[in-house]
Image (tube, rainbow, N blue to C red):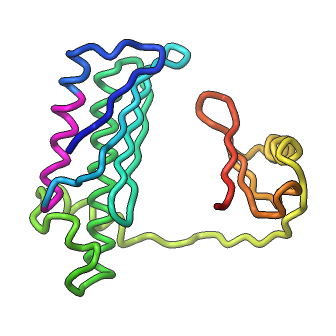
Amino acid sequence: MQFSIRGQQIEVTDALRDYVDKKLSRLEKYFDAPPTSEGYVTLGVVRGLHTVEVTIPLAGVTLRAEDRSDDMYASIDAVVDKLERQIRKHKTKLNRKFRQEGSLKTLFVEGAPSSVAVEEQDYDDLEVVRNKRFTLKPMDVEEAILQMNMVGHNFFVFSNIDTSEVSVVYKRNDGKYGLIEQD
């Protein structure tokens, strides 16, 4: 599996690059054949915290994990752990839903580490505990951000007055805002 490693406000040293490659190579045991797509790793320092973001686009699913801590190596370890949990989660879902051959199930290896049995129980208990309905008010992005901050949430769904589409604004970990729109 190939990864494009880049740094934001940090120089990616050979030692960091080797550590990232070594840790992410642990993920290869979950695949029948190494994915042909290239993964993306971003290492950075934001407000004194070392951040690691990893995105791995696969057929039918995109794996993405992010972690921030005081230590870059600890962040890398945490991101790899999160990615392993995501892979196990998708593998469990696929095994449960797609029993036929030729499906996405063939993306992941059947044999997995012994810790998977414990983790799989967590994903069988997925249930919606609250259902909420509301009317989308047409508004611009700035008004949506103000509404989100007023209700104290970290995201807000609204009807974008500029595009007449449903959009979502969200508060990022760096304190800035993001906008999700439909294609």
Q: Quick check: 7 above or below 167?
A: above
The residue shown at (30%, 53%) is: 85
**Quarter of the figure with residue 182:** bottom right
**Quarter of the figure with residue 178:** top right
The residue shown at (32%, 34%) is: 4
Q: Quick check: 182 above or below 50?
A: below
The residue shown at (35%, 18%) is: 71
Q: Within the magenta stretch, is there residue 23? A: yes
Q: Quick check: 69 above or below 149?
A: above
Q: Is residue 94 left or right of residue 28?
A: right
Question: Residue 156's spot in the image, x, y percent?
Answer: 75, 52
Q: Nearer the viewer, residue 90 or 165?
A: 165
Q: Which residue is most to the bottom?
A: 100
Q: Quick check: 135 above or below 163?
A: below
Q: Is residue 49 left or right of residue 117?
A: right
Question: Residue 125's spot in the image, x, y percent?
Answer: 40, 71
From which residue to which does the magenta span run? 20-32
Question: Residue 30's spot in the image, x, y percent?
Answer: 17, 56
**Quarter of the figure with residue 82:** top left
Q: Does the magenta stretch mainly form a helix, a strand or a loop? A: helix
Instruction: Give the total number of marks visible in the rendering.
Output: 0
Q: Within the magenta stretch, is there residue 111? A: no
The residue shown at (34%, 48%) is: 56
Question: Residue 119's spot in the image, x, y percent?
Answer: 27, 60
Specify the quadrant that holds the C terminus. bottom right
Specify the quadrant that holds the N terminus. top left
